[in-house]
Each structure stands twice: as structure tokens, then as C-alpha cells.
């Protein structure tokens, strides 16, 4: 099976703006009043900057804050329709990298509507620049600088608190899917690996890169102390069902029934809430050391 990234599932991502030099439309529109936001993290940043009322439509991955769900949905960010987006009469399209398909993005970029594409590196250090660049695209540079500085400060504080974990670090396996009993896990260069490290854990699947299926033998060899999954809506994974799978039965995580399930956009969106998500994960991993 070919490897794929979480971006192909419409998650975030993770997200600094592409260089604003290639086309006039890349400069954004500071006066925009009708923004179409494509990507959960872009939408979240706009709301955090106080620009939520300027969003006229969003994609289906934009689930936070709750008010975003009241906006018209133009579809899944990887399966967009140019007609659906342009029918909203936007004066700015703000999109995360990975939106598609490519021909639709080409049509949108060729239109008269300004469009800014946001990159999605899975790195905590990139969050501040994402915020600042989104702010620049919509004329909210000052607010963006304040928010970016707060995020950086919170990340530094979290890193100091997590340092107290020392040699007690736990091996954490992020499981994207268990469909058909096959374990799809997160390796290096992923949002999941980055948040695990941020929370003071060790990614148990460091031998792979990206999101890939693991054999039962590979899961056993990974020896996770904790399994981390995404909560979908109000539905969290059932530990009994997960640890009943042959791949997990002999792992340390199964012995202690250690499973953590958190909202996907919150956990691996790498937006303004990431310091809080990293702290919450750390507190779940090390409740005696890191406080919520």
C-alpha cells in the first residue's frame, strides 16, 4: 500500500503561508468581508483572530469553534468544487496546503478572487508563523502577533514542565485506524509524532515515516505503553475492542488498558489550541508530573 499523509484525510494541518510573491492574489485581501476558509486550522485561526464573522463558508474539516458549523459547508477539503466555492461570492479564499483536487485549485487561483494557500508542516515551531501569515492575509497583523507570541510562550512553558518527566518517558503509538483489524499508525514526520514528542512521549513507530499500516509483529515490536487515537465526534475508541485485536494483546498498553482518545483537530491540528492539547496529552500520560 502506498503511504499517505493525514492531509489526505482532510486533517489539518497542520501551517505557514506559502511565499506571498508569485501572484497578486497571493497577497490576500486585508479588506475581505466574505472569506471561504478551507481547512480546520485556518478556520480556527481566523476565529481566534476575531474574524469569524467574515467567514461566509468553510470546508467539512472546519469543526471548531462550534459557530463554524453554522457556516455553509463547501465540502471535504480534498474533494472541492470550484463552482460551490465561487458561488459563495468570496472576496478571499484561504486554503490549507493539501486542498484539492489540483484542477479545482488551479481554477480558483486563476479566478479573480484573491487566494492564499497555507502550508502544513507538522511542527509546533511553525504555528506562530501560520498565525502571523493568516493575520497578514486578512489585515489583522497586530492581533496575530499577540496570539502568536502567546502560543510560543505556552509552548515554552509546556516544554519546561514536560522536561520533569526525565527518563520516565512512555512509548506512545498513535493509531489512525483499526479497520479490518489492520493497524494504521503514525511514524516520523507526522502531526501525531510531533504532538507525542511535545507531550513528553516517545513515538513507538519511529521506524516508519508517515502514516502506514503495521503488521501484528511490528506492533508487538513497537511495545507501546499507551495507544493514542482520535475521538470522532462524541465517539471514543473502546479500549476492550482495541486491545482485543491480536496485534495489541501482548503489548504493555493492553496489560494496563492504557488508551487515550482525543478530538482530532484539537490533537493534531497544530493551531492556536496546540499548547493546550499538548498539555492535556502530557497530563494524561504523566498525571503525577504534568498538571492540566
Image: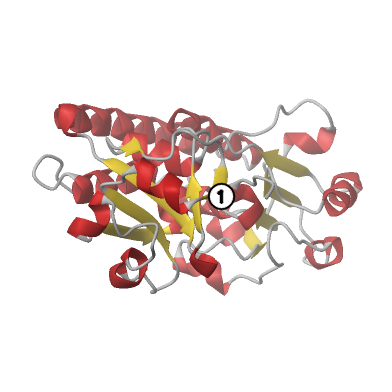
Relative horizontal placement of residue 36, taking residue 258 as reference (left or right): right
Relative horizontal placement of residue 202, taking residue 97 as reference (left or right): left
**Camera-nearest residue between 169 and 32:** 169
Q: Residues within 10 Å of mark 1 (few under 14, many from 20)?
A: many
Question: Where is residue 135, by image quadrant?
Answer: top right
Residue 235 to residue 16: above or below: below
Relative horizontal placement of residue 107, taking residue 225 as reference (left or right): right
Relative horizontal placement of residue 36, taking residue 191 as reference (left or right): right
**Camera-nearest residue between 184 and 23:** 184
Indicate the colouring scheme. secondary structure
**Camera-nearest residue between 252 and 170:** 252
Q: Is residue 29 visible?
A: no
| Residue 21 percent location from the top left of the image | 78, 25
Residue 238 to residue 1: above or below: below
Question: Where is residue 109, by image quadrant?
Answer: top right
Q: Name the residue at 14% across, 29% down.
A: 164
Question: Where is residue 85, by image quadrant?
Answer: bottom right
| Residue 230 percent location from the top left of the image | 42, 60
Q: Is residue 275 visible?
A: yes
According to the picture, the residue beneath numbered tag 1 turns out to be 12
Count of all numbered marks drawn on residues in the image:
1
Q: Name the residue at 72% across, 40% down.
A: 28
Q: Name the residue at 50% across, 51% down.
A: 215
| Residue 225 percent location from the top left of the image | 25, 47
Which residue lies most toward the front here?
A: 217
Badge 1 element: loop
| Residue 8 percent location from the top left of the image | 66, 52
Q: Name the residue at 45% across, 48% down.
A: 268
Amino acid at each position: 500500500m502506498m503511504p499517505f499523509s493525514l492531509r489526505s484525510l482532510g486533517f489539518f494541518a497542520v501551517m505557514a503561508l506559502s511565499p506571498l510573491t508569485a501572484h497578486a492574489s497571493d497577497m490576500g485581501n486585508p479588506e475581505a468581508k466574505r472569506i471561504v476558509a478551507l481547512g480546520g486550522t485556518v478556520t480556527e485561526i481566523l476565529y481566534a483572530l476575531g474574524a469569524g464573522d467574515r467567514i461566509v463558508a468553510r470546508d467539512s474539516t472546519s469543526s471548531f469553534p462550534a459557530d463554524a458549523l453554522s457556516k455553509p459547508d463547501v465540502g471535504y477539503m480534498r474533494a472541492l468544487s470550484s463552482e460551490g466555492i465561487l458561488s459563495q461570492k468570496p472576496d478571499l479564499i484561504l486554503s490549507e496546503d493539501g486542498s484539492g483536487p489540483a484542477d479545482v485549485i488551479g481554477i480558483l487561483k486563476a479566478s479573480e478572487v484573491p487566494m492564499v494557500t497555507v502550508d502544513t508542516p507538522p511542527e509546533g515551531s511553525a504555528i506562530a508563523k501560520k498565525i502571523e501569515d493568516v493575520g497578514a492575509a486578512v489585515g489583522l497583523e497586530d492581533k496575530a502577533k499577540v496570539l502568536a507570541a502567546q502560543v510560543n510562550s505556552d509552548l515554552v512553558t509546556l516544554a519546561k514542565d514536560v522536561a520533569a518527566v526525565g527518563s520516565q518517558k512512555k512509548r506512545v503509538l498513535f493509531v489512525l485506524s483499526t479497520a479490518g483489524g489492520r493497524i494504521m499508525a503514525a511514524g516520523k514526520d507526522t502531526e501525531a509524532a510531533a504532538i507525542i514528542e511535545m507531550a513528553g512521549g516517545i513515538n513507538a513507530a519511529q521506524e516508519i515515516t508517515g502514516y502506514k499500516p503495521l503488521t501484528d509483529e511490528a506492533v508487538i515490536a513497537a511495545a507501546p505503553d499507551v495507544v493514542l487515537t482520535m475521538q470522532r465526534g462524541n465517539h471514543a475508541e473502546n479500549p476492550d475492542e482495541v486491545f482485543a485485536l491480536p496485534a495489541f494483546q501482548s503489548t504493555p498498553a493492553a496489560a494496563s488498558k492504557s488508551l487515550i482518545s482525543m478530538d482530532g483537530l484539537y490533537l493534531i491540528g497544530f493551531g492556536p489550541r496546540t499548547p493546550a492539547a499538548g498539555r492535556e496529552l502530557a497530563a494524561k500520560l504523566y498525571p503525577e508530573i504534568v498538571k492540566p
